[in-house]
Amino acid sequence: MTPFALEIGVALLMLIVLGAGLIGGDGGRRRTGAITALGLVVLVAAAFTLRPWGSAGGGAFVSDRLARFAKRLFLGSTLIGVLASLSLPGEVFRRRATEYYLLLLSSLLGMMVLASARDLILLFVAFELMSIPLYALAGFRKREPEAVEAALKFFLVGTVSSAVMAYGLSFVYGTAATTALPGVARALEGQPPLLVFGLLAVLAGFGFKIAAFPFHMWVPDTYEAASTPFVAWLSVAPKAAGFVALFRIFLEGVGDQVTLWMPIIAALAAVTIVGGNLMALPQQNVKRLLAYSGIAHIGYMLVGLAAVSASGTAMVLFYLVAYVFANMGAFLVVEVVARSEGTEHLNGFRGLAQRSPLLAVAMLLFLLSLGGIPFVAGFWAKLYVLWAAAEAGLYWLVLLGAILTVVALFYYLVIARRMYIDPPTRPEPIPLAPTMALCVIVCVLGVVVLGLAPSPLVLAALRAASRLF
């Protein structure tokens, strides 16, 4: 089986969606969402059944266990995002649905190529293929000034990060005289200063992409202004792609010098955890609260990366899957409540348990998972990354992460108090579209099942990470 099998599938799906939008008129444009969702269902099934092995381009593109693990995550999260978008209201969205889904699939294709890239040029091109459609999607509601402003901030920060990354890669290539990751690892054995500087610049560029502190400035405004189903997907899939690229460069690509990055990444993890949690405390808009909460979660994932071990890397992969279900589910509940109440303020959740008890239970499970409470998926995710850091001797980072987990519980439980203690402003239940209900149910099942039986995913993550070491 060709290593490009899934990428070819995504490209064919893009052509089908484009044809449906162009040939079918208004009806075809309305059907593009259903066609995209159906195509993604087929691709998800293929990702779990097909075994595309091997490499191409002299090793520049590889289909290994890490790549396949990441591609399954990308496809699954994109499917949830597409299903949630099927219930988006408004004639404008339906008229431009083909454009929306083509941009989404273009970014997905970039992520999938990025997961397999073992060459610096291919990695950079895949990063741009992933990122450029996101700028357009962030400003998709172009008649709303807030969306345009958020998209502009996202674009400016993204282009600066790309420039910083390209600048660093130029030093890497100039010193190593190759763009292949194995050649970079051999060149780093003597720790030449220019090569180390280049990799530091690349790390700073990645900091913008994954929204680590202090490179996070685009996140709150973009999350608040963009459409919520897109934000739910944006908050997880591109971040997962960024971490897979970090694994490729800073673990696989540096060889025996891997411990060189432990103190740098540990410091970045610490400031990201502290900054994200403290900035989330005063937020009254739930989407901004989840945006800063997401920054803190990036910090916890960096804790696993700082351990520079197979177990640490595997636990980051586990964390990413748990985060997909919990964070996407929370954003989708916010979308349902905001569409009913006309506000994304915390007060919109008042009395939700009395009005729509099942929706309130779902949101509570997502919040408990994000907060790391036993026994849902997020508990094991945080426990495992902190355990890996402790095995690497980063006890101060483990202590900091544990303390800030308690801080995070405060702002998560503020939402829970609004749902279960405050009286409702209106008695009628909140309407829930069938496709949105399906997405919320899938996310609830993911959070609960991974909380009760994490072992299969842990073993799969360990197998995916073992080759890097």
Image (cartoon, grey):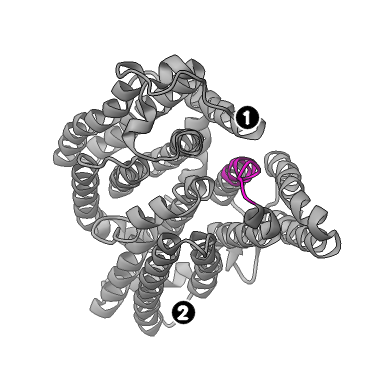
| Quarter-of-image position of residue 416 | top left
How crowded is the residue under tag 1: few (<14 C-alpha within 10 Å), some, or many (20+)? Answer: some
Q: How many marks?
A: 2
Classify mark 1: helix, strand or loop: helix
Is the stretch drawn in magenta largely helix, strand or loop? helix
Kindly tell me whether residue 452 is visible in this rendering. no
**Magenta part of the chain:** 77-90
Tag 1 residue:
438
The mark closer to the camera, 1 or 2, is 1
Residue that lies at the very extreme toward the front in this rendered image: 426
Q: Residue 191, percent across and down?
A: 26, 72
Q: Is residue 249 left or right of residue 92?
A: left
Residue drawn 46% across the image and 33% down it:
337
Circles 1 and 2, Cβ within 8 Å, touching? The answer is: no
Q: Residue 109, percent across and down?
A: 62, 60
Depth check: 235 or 10 in front?
235
Q: Quote the CA–CA distance across marks 1 and 2.
A: 48 Å
Tag 2 residue:
178
